[in-house]
Amino acid sequence: MQPNREQRLWMYEHMLVSRYFEETIEKIYLEGKTPAFNMANGPIPGEMHLSNGQEPCAVGVCAHLNAGDIVTSTHRPHHVAIAKGVDLDRMAAEIFGKKTGLSGGRGGHMHIFDPAVNFSCSGIIAQGMAPAVGAALSRKMSNREGVAVAFLGEGAANQGAFHESLNLAAVWELPVVFVIEDNSWGISVPKADATAVPRNDVRAAAYGMPGVYVTDNDPFAIFDAAGEAIARARAGGGPTLIEIETWRLAGHFMGDAEGYRPKGEKDALFAKDPIPRMRERLIAAGDLTAGDDAALAAKARARVDTAIAFARESDYPAAEEALERVFA
Amino acid sequence: MQPNREQRLWMYEHMLVSRYFEETIEKIYLEGKTPAFNMANGPIPGEMHLSNGQEPCAVGVCAHLNAGDIVTSTHRPHHVAIAKGVDLDRMAAEIFGKKTGLSGGRGGHMHIFDPAVNFSCSGIIAQGMAPAVGAALSRKMSNREGVAVAFLGEGAANQGAFHESLNLAAVWELPVVFVIEDNSWGISVPKADATAVPRNDVRAAAYGMPGVYVTDNDPFAIFDAAGEAIARARAGGGPTLIEIETWRLAGHFMGDAEGYRPKGEKDALFAKDPIPRMRERLIAAGDLTAGDDAALAAKARARVDTAIAFARESDYPAAEEALERVFA
Amino acid sequence: MNDKVSVTNERRLTIARAMAEAIAQEMRVDERVFVMGEDIGTLGGVFGNTRGLVEEFGKLRVRDTPISETGFIGAAVGAASDGMRPVVELMFVDFFGVCMDAIYNLMAKNTYFSGGSVKVPLVLMTSTGGGYSDAGQHSQCLYGTFAHLPGMKVVSPSNAYDAKGMMTAAIRDENPVIFMYHKGLQGMGWLGTEPGATVNVPEESYEVPFGKAAVVREGTDVTIVGLAMGVHNALKAADLLAKKGVSAEVVDLRTLVPLDRDTVFNSVKKTGRLIVVDEDYHSFGVSGEIIASVCERDVSVLKAAPRRVAYPDVPIPFSRPMEQFCLPNPDKIVAAFDSIAGA
Amino acid sequence: MNDKVSVTNERRLTIARAMAEAIAQEMRVDERVFVMGEDIGTLGGVFGNTRGLVEEFGKLRVRDTPISETGFIGAAVGAASDGMRPVVELMFVDFFGVCMDAIYNLMAKNTYFSGGSVKVPLVLMTSTGGGYSDAGQHSQCLYGTFAHLPGMKVVSPSNAYDAKGMMTAAIRDENPVIFMYHKGLQGMGWLGTEPGATVNVPEESYEVPFGKAAVVREGTDVTIVGLAMGVHNALKAADLLAKKGVSAEVVDLRTLVPLDRDTVFNSVKKTGRLIVVDEDYHSFGVSGEIIASVCERDVSVLKAAPRRVAYPDVPIPFSRPMEQFCLPNPDKIVAAFDSIAGA
Ligand SMILES: Cc1ncc(C[n+]2csc(CCOP(=O)(O)OP(=O)(O)O)c2C)c(N)n1
Ligand SMILES: Cc1ncc(C[n+]2csc(CCOP(=O)(O)OP(=O)(O)O)c2C)c(N)n1
Ligand SMILES: [Mg+2]
Ligand SMILES: [Mg+2]
């Protein structure tokens, strides 16, 4: 399954928005945190896990989804949220802890919820998976359309919730797709030290479901694999497991000195940064001129800037609001 | 790998002891529980999970183990404990809640611990698995001999601990063997409704370890598969997953009306009860005469009777002992 | 049984049947309600509280699950957020250790994390309690463990009337509710049965609201506060105390979250003495909270030191003499009163 | 810092370094000791408490694990029972929900279940606390959750001297110990740092025994009881109160299990007033237990209602103004005193 031109451009544009968003967050995150780096300071306090390099996973999968479909994501959620169509202004405001944020500032960057597009995430490894299974069950039981996609990291594939979620989805033949973003690191631990098999797609066999591995962080190959899996799910054909080779261009979180990374690894990854690669590919294919590209980039930047401005300008919640919304 | 005559007779004898033990417990369990069945009453209160029919799994595996090897078992532990050489008197006394019991009455039938032969169990599904992995790690790290075997039911193979334990054992190449007793039921839920694949041996591939399925509850086939796996573990070849087709001839626990079982299923299972089958096989092979058999049976019965008498005659712990042994 | 016996008929039900009836009635009127858990279909629940449901509603709405608590409770969170109203069983509360993240970090917090835009109307029913020699992984109450963590309502009925009304309220609640039922009160003969739990239950639907403790016996000399089985121990102790001329008031908390501190405080204000009965572990749990709640409001209402009759801080032993020694009982409550009677 | 400053040198360490030093010293003398957890090898622990260990002891004794807490904590139980002495890291205490069975049903109970024939000498170290906007799944304390369940010791140091001595004691203990370290006290700049936690630490090995609270400041008008970060809030409040002429005594509990009820009671007996500071959730936790412990022993020692300054019963919000509003702080403690000063 290959994306048409419109889809190709949609994917590229969302990759651009995602990257600009992360680059902007990265800069702002450092505000107020120098010279002594203290996470608690600055306009964006707390942990920050950036998705630079992993954009292909988000756009290749979400290109097949509509607002009614469900996505659950992880502690590293921005690129997926953007591709899923989460309200960017309110997401930015949430990351800043503002009252106008998606959760009024209660959640922050690891707890992005936008029910309008059925997006959510959780900061506990692999724990977003079972809720995706349950949302798929909900659709199947109530005969409502919709596919659920659970994103996870390759490190999460060794957590018990992974096993239970895949088995349950398979036993009940639910419309859910599991997408592993294999950036080969779980914080400082390389995949080979944590996972008994080189590729997690082989684990699909343990649940009698199809398993696919996509190499080289390739947006079109991801589009292809995800398209098939999502179509199968929509048609009642049950779950699929997809693992995608992708690249973590940033540290695990902001402030990570990355001393554990082998010399040269990051240079090699930057050399195949998916954004310029995609740009060249689209230009080569005649989808895009340099002028189009500049326009798209400007549009993406403007979109991000608007969101960031909204976030910056919004008020903080009143302190006492902390006590509200515990119960519906 | 085939058992020699001594091993064959050892296996048969331990099957007999196990079966007599369970039959005796079954009778005593009902004492004081009629006419109105109340679990709290009688000389053996609480839940009681019998292993009738599953004896081949225990003897086929434990025939390869010595006292220094580690076994962890489940809520249904008696047959395995007996084959592992747990002190039968003190195990019986524990099941009766007596002061002379292995744990002075604190544990009961789901918490049999006999460090002299490195046996333990847990009542929480699949939770005995990781401790087996850890014991194997302990041996490997300290260069002490020993293989660990974790027993579990087929229902347990859908619990997260299963996945994490197998992956960890494989990543660290530990001397541990995982043995699934597939009696096809998890209480009232048939395997097919709970497990996405017909046979769990395929799950071994998810960890890059060998997987074997043994059909027909056959003690010699079990001996063969376990022998190979344990030898590999001892030789530093890492973990193996074995699933064994076995039969739950009793209810899930005492008092289970088993209304959920298809008509005829139990009759069919009783028709292939592994004890008489083993007897016939040994007689046919010339390992055993009818006279030898009667003698073995009498010996097994006597062993069980002694243990039960010990348990019956022992005192209950003083009530206040409840407060002791929380900490070492 | 004061305010709650506005019953319109004389039908007596066990808690198990009352729970099943409440679930069935809600399933009839609300197709979003479904049930899942281990052995809750054909078997009808190990403790009888889903009997008859699969026969009436079929296997699609009454789903036996694999032994995958993290999987199916997490799935229930996803289904509830997507518009369904799952009623889920965790067979024994003792098993919370294999699935607590789905419960306390997702189910309980997603409403807050989402700023209220996501609702998680989910009932997690789970059995508690010992007394029948099921040892240390199958006999715990863990009331305090759940009540301590924010974002979930925590309730536990002492009788079938409350059980039905609280289950109905739980299913209709827009929030997650932990519905803890004590095995010894279920009315399943094989677990022993506290007769006081089997009471008249109306056929029609009704709710017993959360956050309202019940004064189940009025008295003037001491307030005995309990929950679930504790209430029956308290009532029996009150009978014994009455024979000695002591008038005990018994408060059935019914819900721990929300906690009706007012009713407890007002009772202690009247009686001047407080005994808390709790089958959960002694320290850092329910008994400490109840005592602290009274003292911090006005310590001068206490004529004597408050007392607790709780499970000691030891794992639950199997052997009957040891287990019975540890469990709260009416005599211990009477002894607790005797120790403060002089004041 | 009274009794604990019998230091023989002037070297000041952070808690992170004190923990790593204690572990290293035990590893040098006892080859059964090993470390496992996520990112505790090359990275040296996200919170710095295993820095330098892999370099000295190698990857076989300092083992980075997969993200499989049930697997590796359960494995630690098996290894400990087989004669090893694992020191295991659960990176954030908030993650207990994915592995609690291995902790509370195996690690904590196997000694009891085995009648004492099996020992589980295992240290589970885990980070607690918030204050740096890490939101509701990475900022909890959960002291009460662990202290409530029997069979494990639960400790939390407020300074590096105690941290080293308590870690040494934990590793040498024949029982499971939950070693909770507060992120804000670790001395990792990026988490903010409470300067009072970085103190003189002797180079030689020593133990700080469990079950002995420390009176870290003497006073006569009110007893402020806290743990870990709570102690620093209490000390700052005591300074503020001193300016108003109020003499506050500050008790550092140091260990929750065993709990030194005597030291708390004796202090309150002297001062007549009690304030408990707790960063864990308000209800059904540490603050209730401390208050109940005093009241049940002799309620008449209290001149005024006891007070608690605890985390409200809400999930921890991300946004700074909201989080700071919820956290205990010196001003809240002073206000609590003011509310009972008249009595
Ligand atoms: C159950 C649990 N254990 C540990 C953590 C801490 N943690 C946060 S991210 C992370 C690494 C995750 O690796 P991976 O799944 O590969 O995702 P990535 O960070 O590479 O996107 C860890 C260990 C957690 N959040 N939850
Ligand atoms: C985590 C957990 N969930 C549920 C249970 C309740 N339970 C006890 S035995 C059992 C069935 C186990 O089936 P299986 O693993 O096949 O073992 P079998 O009983 O057939 O020997 C269940 C669900 C439990 N003890 N622990
Ligand atoms: Mg990764
Ligand atoms: Mg089975």
Image: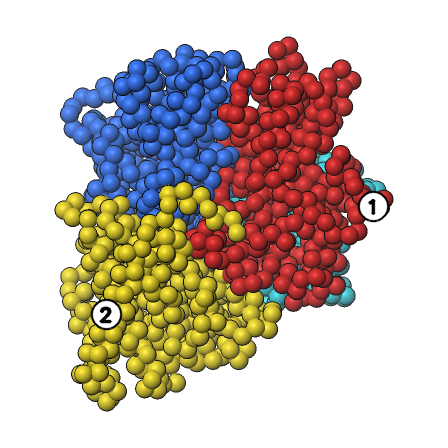
Chain colours: A yellow, B cyan, C red, D blue
Q: Residues within 10 Å of mark 1 (few under 14, many from 20)?
A: few
Where residue D110 appears, x then y in whole percent? 50, 38
| Residue A220, placed above or below residue C189 | below
Classify mark 1: helix, strand or loop: loop
Q: Can you tell me whether the CB of the residue at mark 1 lies under 8 Å from the nearest atom of ligand 2?
A: no
Along the viewing direction, whichever of A116 and A275 lies nearer the viewer? A116
Q: Is residue B83 left or right of residue A206?
A: right
The residue depicted at 52 percent of the width and 25 percent of the height is C297
Chain letter for the residue marked with disc 2 in the picture: A
Q: Looking at the rendered structure, which numbered label has been put on residue C8?
A: 1
The residue depicted at 45 percent of the width and 31 percent of the height is D286
* Number of numbered markers: 2
Q: CA distance from mark 1 to mark 2?
A: 68 Å
Along the viewing direction, whichever of A249 and D171 lies nearer the viewer? A249
The answer to whether marks 1 and 2 sit on the same chain is: no
The residue depicted at 24 percent of the width and 77 percent of the height is A296
Q: Is residue C195 left or right of residue C153?
A: right
Q: Is residue C239 visible?
A: yes
Disc 1 + disc 2, Cβ < 8 Å: no
Q: Is residue B22 visible?
A: no
Along the viewing direction, whichever of A189 and D282 lies nearer the viewer? D282
Where residue B141 appears, x then y in whole percent? 33, 47
Q: Looking at the rendered structure, which numbered label has been put on residue A63?
A: none
At label 2, which amino acid type do we have? Arg
Q: Is residue B112 left or right of residue B284?
A: left
